Image: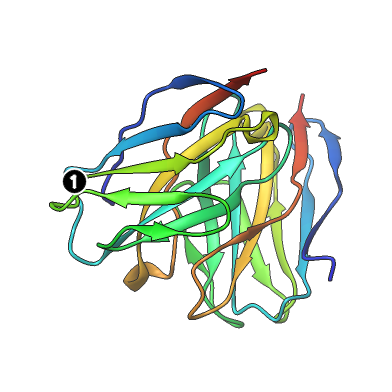
Amino acid sequence: DAKTTQPNSMESNEEEPVHLPCNHSTISGTDYIHWYRQLPSQGPEYVIHGLTSNVNNRMASLAIAEDRKSSTLILHRATLRDAAVYYCILRDEDQGGKLIFGQGTELSVKP
Amino acid sequence: NAGVTQTPKFQVLKTGQSMTLQCAQDMNHNSMYWYRQDPGMGLRLIYYSASEGTTDKGEVPNGYNVSRLNKREFSLRLESAAPSQTSVYFCASSSRGRWEQYFGPGTRLTVT
């Protein structure tokens, strides 16, 4: 399974944008880039996914490098409720949709 | 919809005891998954079921068995619990053709 590399932790100020980076230099052509987040004492929740093009939804935006070896999750205005561990995951649909979680980035948001 | 439900929420076992963790989803999803999460770590896949009647091993299947009882329910059994199985266990489900997995609230298991 292709691996991802993320910073262990990041800090942000409330109401400012946050850019969470992810490196995936060994990504294959069939891997989709997924982001999940896990709030304290909860199960993970889906945030966004993409293949090649940048993606937007109500929660966040996903910017994917042209060579697909890196991506960035963008939270446009961080709130205190966005404090969580964010996981960048490569998912191969040919493997039953399994998610292989890494360590993730722990995001703290300061008021 | 309740989404994904897990029982029990907490459990303490002695080494060598057995137990079954229950998971149910009411979203008519085809695929279901069991993960474990150790302190400070990401989730690791134990077993998954791509569809009713099928199960496959994940990253860390040793010491566990699963049963896909029907489309709604997917149980995880520890036959002889060990302290190394102390963890938080999450169940998840997803629909074929949809991307996101939906996770339950987790079961905190301590084996002494």
Question: x%, y% of residue B96?
Answer: 51, 80
Report the front residue among A108 and A15. A15
Counting the numbered discs, the total is 1
Is the image coloured rainbow, by chain, by secondary structure, or in one colour?
rainbow
Report the front residue among B63 and A51. A51
The residue located at (51%, 59%) in the rendering is A57
Question: x%, y% of residue A24?
Answer: 24, 43
What amino acid is at disc 1? Lys
State the quadrant of the C terminus of chain B. top right
State the quadrant of the N terminus of chain B. bottom right
Q: Quadrant of residue A80?
A: top right
The residue located at (48%, 46%) in the rendering is B60
Question: x%, y% of residue A84?
Answer: 60, 32
Report the front residue among A78 and A22. A78
The residue pinned by badge 1 equals A69
Q: Is residue A95 left or right of residue A2?
A: right
Residue furthest to the left: A67
Neighbour class for label 1 at 10 Å: few (<14), some, many (≥20)?
A: some
The residue located at (70%, 81%) in the rendering is B28
- In this view, B71 is above or below A91: below
- In this view, B95 is above or below A57: below
- In this view, A86 is above or below A52: above
- In this view, B109 is above or below A30: above
Report the front residue among B2 and B36. B2
The residue located at (57%, 62%) in the rendering is B101
Task: Provide the secondary structure element on which disc 1 rests.
Answer: loop
Question: x%, y% of residue A106?
Answer: 52, 26
Judging from the image, mark 1 belongs to the subunit labelled: A
- Looking at the image, can residue A93 be seen? yes
- Looking at the image, can residue B40 be seen? no
